[in-house]
Image (cartoon, helix red, strand yellow):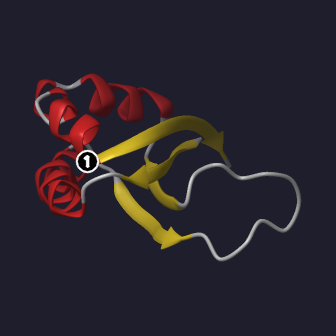
Amino acid sequence: MTALIVARFDVKNAAKMDAYATAAGPTVLAHGGEFVAIGEKVTALVGEEEKQSVAMVRFPDVASAKTWFTSPEYTACKPLREEAAEMQFTLYETE
């Protein structure tokens, strides 16, 4: 089964967000991930949605997603991520 990481976020600093995306993107690809979607919220159709933006990344499996998230390459990006945005990451197993 494949895995999907959904990141919901509010950008605090656009320049740092660009730097984070530039740094983190290659780490995703190096671990077999692919970006499925990146977008801005238009409106909540049902319920409350706190975060304004979303990024979805597909990995071959849950183990690959977890390995990417804890990898030294991605771990090095985390301080920049924390300066760039308030983020929530959720891992899903998909068919």
- Quarter of the image with the N terminus is top right
**Residue lying furthest right:** 46
Please give the name of the residue rendered at 17% of the width and 45% of the height, measured from the top-left corner: 27
Instruction: Answer above or below: position of 46 versus 75.
Output: below
Taking 43 as reference, is 46 left or right?
Answer: right
Pointer 1 residue: 84
- Picture coordinates of residue 33, whole percent (x, y): 33, 51
Please give the name of the residue rendered at 40% of the width and 35% of the height, measured from the top-left corner: 65
Please give the name of the residue rendered at 50% of the width and 37% of the height, measured from the top-left corner: 88
Q: Neighbour class for label 1 at 10 Å: few (<14), some, many (≥20)?
A: many
Q: Tell me the quarter of the picture where residue 34 sits.
A: bottom left
Q: Tell me the quarter of the picture where residue 17 sits.
A: bottom left
Q: Nearer the viewer, residue 51 or 34?
A: 51
- Picture coordinates of residue 57, whole percent (x, y): 43, 54
**Residue lying furthest bottom:** 42
Q: Amino acid at mark 1?
A: Ala
Q: Nearer the viewer, residue 61 or 78?
A: 78
- Picture coordinates of residue 93, whole percent (x, y): 62, 38
